[in-house]
Image (cartoon, rainbow, N blue to C red):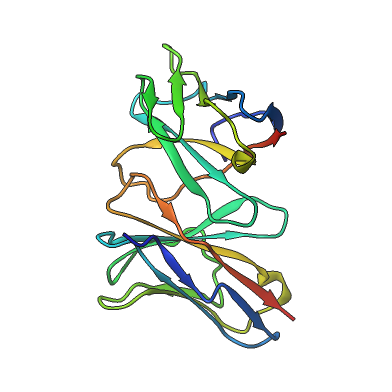
Amino acid sequence: DAKTTQPTSMDCAEGRAANLPCNHSTISGNEYVYWYRQIHSQGPQYIIHGLKNNETNEMASLIITEDRKSSTLILPHATLRDTAVYYCIVRPYGGSQGNLIFGKGTKLSVKP
Amino acid sequence: NAGVMQNPRHLVRRRGQEARLRCSPMKGHSHVYWYRQLPEEGLKFMVYLQKENIIDESGMPKERFSAEFPKEGPSILRIQQVVRGDSAAYFCASSPGTGVEQYFGPGTRLTVT
C-alpha cells in the first residue's frame, strides 16, 4: 500500500502557482520523497525528489517540512499542459527496492 | 538522448493468442521495470530486471506472463494465451541503478478481443 496521502483533485488557474500537498507521516529516515506525474494516456514522468532540504529544478520545487511528515510540490506558473495526475511516492534512495508504489495521486486540472 | 522506447504502441490480440511487448531502455540504463495500468485504475508494478536477470517479479501474475532482458536487445514482456482481462496499458521504465529515479516509456496499449 502507498505510504502517502494526497487530495483526490485540485484546480488551478493558468499562470498561477499550483501547490500540491502530500502527507507521509510514517516516512523513515532513509526514505526520499519522489514526485511523478501522468498526463492523460502517457507514461509517467519523473518530476523531482528530495530528502529533507528543499529542491528545485526546471520543472518544479519541492518543499519538505522540517519533521519530514509532509511536503508540497510547487509548479510556479501552471499551464494547461500541466493538467495531469500527480503522484507522491516515498522510497529509499539507492536501496534494493526497485519498484515504485503508485497511489491514487492528485488529479490537477489547470483551467484557463 | 532518446528516451525509453516501447513497441508496438498499440496491439490487438484475440483471446488465446500471444502478446509480445518490447522495451528499449534509455542509453546507459541497465535496469528495466514493467508496470501495468488497467482501465480506470492505478499503475501496478509487475517485474524488475537487469541484464539477463530477473531481480523482482513479485507483481507478475503466476501464469501466462513472463519477462526477459537479454544481454543484447530489448526487454520483452510476454503474455501467453491472452484473455480480455489482460487489456491494459503496459509501461516500461528504466534507470541507471537501483532505487533511483525511473524514466518511463509511452506505453503499449493491449486490447484483447
Residue occupying the point 46% across, 30% down: A60
Residue occupying the point 58% across, 23% down: A17
Q: In the picture, which quadrant includes the C terminus of chain A?
A: top right
Q: Is residue A92 left or right of residue A78?
A: left
State which quadrant residue A18 falls in: top right
Farthest-out residue, top: A66
Q: What x and y, as percent, mark residue A80?
A: 64, 39
Q: Is residue A64 left or right of residue B89?
A: left
Q: Is residue A31 left or right of residue B96?
A: right
Q: What x and y, as percent, mark residue A19?
A: 58, 23
Q: Is residue A80 above or below residue A54?
A: below
Observer-nearest residue: A26 or A81?
A81
Residue occupying the point 66% across, 81% down: B12
Residue occupying the point 54% across, 33% down: A3
Q: What x and y, as percent, mark residue B15?
A: 70, 85
Q: Is residue A103 above or below residue B109?
A: above
